[in-house]
Amino acid sequence: MATNFKENRGGGKRSGQPQFPQEILHLDNRAVALPPSLELYLILLCFFIFCFGNPASKSQQAPKNPTVEAFLSQFNRLQDRFPGQSPHLWVRGRKLLQKHLNASHHTQPAIIILTASRKGERTLRCLSAHVADTYSAALHASTVQIDGTDKSGLQSDQAKLEVDSELSSAFQAGGRAAVIHHFELLPAGATLIFYKYCDHESAAFKDVALLLTVLLEEETLETHISLQQVEERVRDFLWAKFTKTRTPGSYDHMDSDKLSGLWSRISHLVLPIHPVQTIEKGGCHVHAKP
């Protein structure tokens, strides 16, 4: 059915157009006064949006973890004490240890392999000890250091017992970091004790940091070597070192399957260490402890 609008030819308005009272169509210029309660609500709303909706404000108000702050303060100083190192050492190493310190519930220990060439042997020992001390000092705890050189002449079972005893005693006494120097010199079968300490789910101590050092046979290590190349080089070196021992089937024998399982537990992060000449010539005592 067609709608029948009559057109007012004089005014050009249609009779079907809604008609509004003049007091609605013509508002005066007076400001509309808001109720006091509504004004207060708007003021509070703006305040909360500014304080809690501003990302910068969140970062400023976020509580700091004093343990992490103490660690970062000391760890960052190591970069000046040990020049010429790979940026990965300072970035990836710091990130892993910082994350572990900041965790409220630990599921596994923090594990890092540090490696160097023959010309960086003293720097490797010195820097690994400093990193471990920096971690444990932030927790007001101690560091235990074990040298594979001292275990190299032992039978695997005896070396394994000694390493187990030293680690467990230190951690039970409140120690929070350990350095295993010359991991490559431990008797092959003795390294299986690290299943106990480095397992992804059932490590005996989960709130600790373990640093394993591996001294490679080559004289020098490329300055710009990638992390993948470093990891492959250490893996191949340990495979050659540990899987050629004695008679297959003997207690001292480490086979490829056992080593593969161990490697998956300890190779979370493998970092290169480059020689610092003042340390190689003068020893670690030229650097004060953190």
Image (spheres, rainbow, N blue to C red):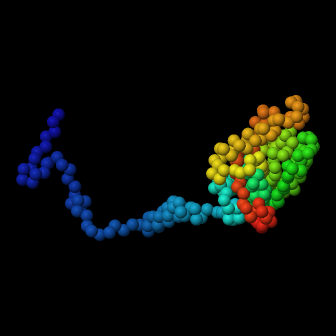
Q: Position of residue 39 (x, y in %)?
A: 44, 67
Reply above or below: 144 against 285.
Answer: above
Reply above or below: 229 against 276.
Answer: above
Q: Is residue 29 visible?
A: yes
Judge from the rendering whether residue 249 lies leftward or rightward of residue 279; answer left or right: right
Q: Residue at x 23, y 62 (%)?
A: 26
Judge from the rendering whether residue 7 lies leftward or rightward of residue 289; answer left or right: left
Judge from the rendering whether residue 126 lies leftward or rightward of residue 86; answer left or right: right
Q: Nearer the viewer, residue 272 or 267?
A: 272
Q: Residue at x 83, y 42 (%)?
A: 191
Q: Position of residue 113 (x, y in %)?
A: 74, 49
Q: Position of residue 4 (x, y in %)?
A: 13, 40
Reply above or below: 85 against 185.
Answer: below
Q: Position of residue 184 (x, y in %)?
A: 81, 45
Q: Can you tell which quarter of the image residue 154 is in?
A: top right
Instruction: State the quadrant of the C terminus.
Output: bottom right
Q: Nearer the viewer, residue 248 or 69?
A: 248
Instruction: State the quadrant of the N terminus.
Output: top left
